[in-house]
Image (cartoon, helix red, strand yellow):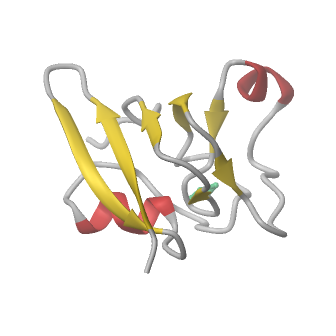
Amino acid sequence: MTHNILHLSGDNNDQWLLVHQDELILEALLEHGVAIKQACTNGVCGVCLTPLLKGEIDYADRIPRGLNEKEKQNGYFLPCIAKCKTAIRIGPPKVKLR
Ligand code: FES
C-alpha cells in the first residue's frame, strides 16, 4: 500500500494527513474532518476548488470541467476527482462552509 502525505496549510494551524494513493483527496479531507464544501463530486461544479501549493495531483481520466483557465493558472484544483501523485501541500478550500 502506498500513501502520500497531504499537508494542509490552514489559516491558523496546519494538518498533515496520510492519503492512500487510490483515495480521492476530497474523501481524505472529509474523513479527517476538514471543512470542505462539495456538491457534484465529479469535477463539474467547482465548489470544492482548493489551492495546490506544492506537489502534483492526478485526475487520471477525469476532466476538471469546473475549473476555468484563470483558476488553473492560479494553482487551483478539484479535490473531488483528484488523487495525490506525490506528497502535496494545499491551502484552505476557496468556498467556506457556513
Ligand atoms: S464537488 Fe463539484 S467540482 Fe468538486
Q: Quarter-wise, where is residue 3 in the image?
A: bottom left
The residue nearer to you, when weighing 72 against 66, is 72
Vertical comparison of 51 with 46: above or below: above
53 sits left or right of 81 in the view: left
87 sits left or right of 12 in the view: right
Vertical comparison of 38 with 87: above or below: below
The residue nearer to you, when weighing 64 against 84, is 84
Residue sitting farthest toward the left: 13
Q: Residue at x 81, y 33 (%)?
A: 68
Q: Position of residue 79 (x, y in %)?
A: 55, 53
Vertical comparison of 85 with 51: above or below: below
- Ligand 1's quadrant: bottom right
Vertical comparison of 86 with 32: above or below: above
Residue sitting farthest toward the front: 1
17 sits left or right of 82 in the view: left
Q: Position of residue 24 (x, y in %)?
A: 52, 68
Say which quadrant the N terminus sits in: bottom left
Q: Position of residue 23 (x, y in %)?
A: 49, 73
Q: Quarter-wise, where is residue 98 in the image?
A: top left
The residue nearer to you, when weighing 90 against 34, is 90
